[in-house]
């Protein structure tokens, strides 16, 4: 298993994030993405807002010193949501689980919530391994798929 470390997001991370978050296969699996994942100007504006505000906390995920993704949280108090993205070339190595665990060790926020496409078994497994429990189901419009799909809602308490 790779040594996973979190650090603040740096400017040099953004080109990698953009490449990963505009990967058609990865966006199809994630389902809930930006309106146009290939719009670099919108991506840059989104990350500028994230990095300048205090309501979103994001960390770059490093595995054995290489940038492999990001993890963090956003939302209103009492409804904080976790989010993570690992570049597709790094899937299947346990990095998302390790990154989320590291983030959970770093943040005192509880409860924490998350949503995943019901058919995104990899993401659901990551959340389960990190102690999140299913608390509901929903349907939402998945931009990456162009249709409404089932979602699983999960929560990590105390």
Image (cartoon, grey):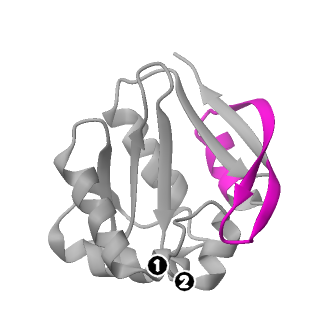
Say if the magenta span includes residue 140. Answer: yes
Question: Which picture quadrant has residue 64?
Answer: bottom left
Please report the residue visible at 32 percent of the width from the left and 42 percent of the height from the top. 56
Asked whether 26 or 42 is in front, the reply is 42
C-alpha separation, residue under disc 1 versus residue under disc 2: 5 Å
The percent position of residue 24, horizontal first and vertical second, equals 61, 84
Q: Secondary structure at mark 1?
A: helix
**In this picture, residue 65 sits left or right of residue 10:** right
Q: Secondary structure at mark 2?
A: loop
Residue under numbered circle 2? 23
Say if the magenta span includes residue 89. Answer: no
Question: Which picture quadrant has residue 46?
Answer: bottom left
What residue range appears in magenta?
Answer: 123-150
Please report the residue visible at 69 percent of the width from the left and 70 percent of the height from the top. 29
The answer to whether residue 67 shows anywhere in this view is no
Asked whether 98 or 23 is in front, the reply is 23
Q: For the residue carrying disc 2, how many other residues have a C-alpha within 10 Å: few (<14), some (14-19), or many (20+)?
A: some
Q: How many marks?
A: 2
Please report the residue visible at 43 percent of the width from the left and 53 percent of the height from the top. 99
**In this picture, residue 142 sits left or right of residue 22:** right
The percent position of residue 30, horizontal first and vertical second, equals 64, 64
The percent position of residue 70, horizontal first and vertical second, equals 38, 60
The percent position of residue 44, horizontal first and vertical second, equals 28, 71
The answer to whether residue 76 shows anywhere in this view is yes
Can you say whether 142 is above or below 154 in the image? below
Can you say whether 124 is above or below 135 in the image? below
Please report the residue visible at 41 percent of the width from the left and 41 percent of the height from the top. 73
The reply to whether dot 1 and dot 2 touch (C-beta < 8 Å) is: yes
Q: For the residue carrying disc 1, how many other residues have a C-alpha within 10 Å: few (<14), some (14-19), or many (20+)?
A: many
Can you say whether 89 is above or below 77 in the image? below
Asked whether 31 or 103 is in front, the reply is 31
């Amino acid at each position: 298993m790779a040594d996973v470390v979190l650090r603040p997001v740096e400017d040099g991370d953004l080109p990698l994030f953009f490449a990963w978050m505009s990967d058609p296969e990865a966006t199809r699996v994630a389902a809930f993405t930006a309106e146009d994942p290939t719009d670099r100007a919108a991506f840059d504006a989104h990350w500028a807002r994230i990095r300048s505000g205090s309501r979103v906390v994001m960390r770059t995920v490093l595995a054995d010193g290489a940038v492999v993704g990001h993890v963090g949280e956003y939302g209103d108090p009492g409804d904080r949501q976790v989010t993570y993205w690992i570049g597709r070339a790094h899937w299947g190595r346990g990095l998302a689980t390790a990154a989320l665990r590291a983030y959970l060790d770093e943040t005192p926020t509880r409860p924490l919530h998350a949503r995943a496409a019901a058919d995104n078994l990899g993401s659901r497994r990551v959340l389960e391994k990190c102690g999140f429990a299913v608390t509901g189901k929903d349907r939402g419009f998945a931009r990456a798929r162009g249709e409404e799909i089932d979602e699983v809602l999960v929560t990590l308490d105390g």
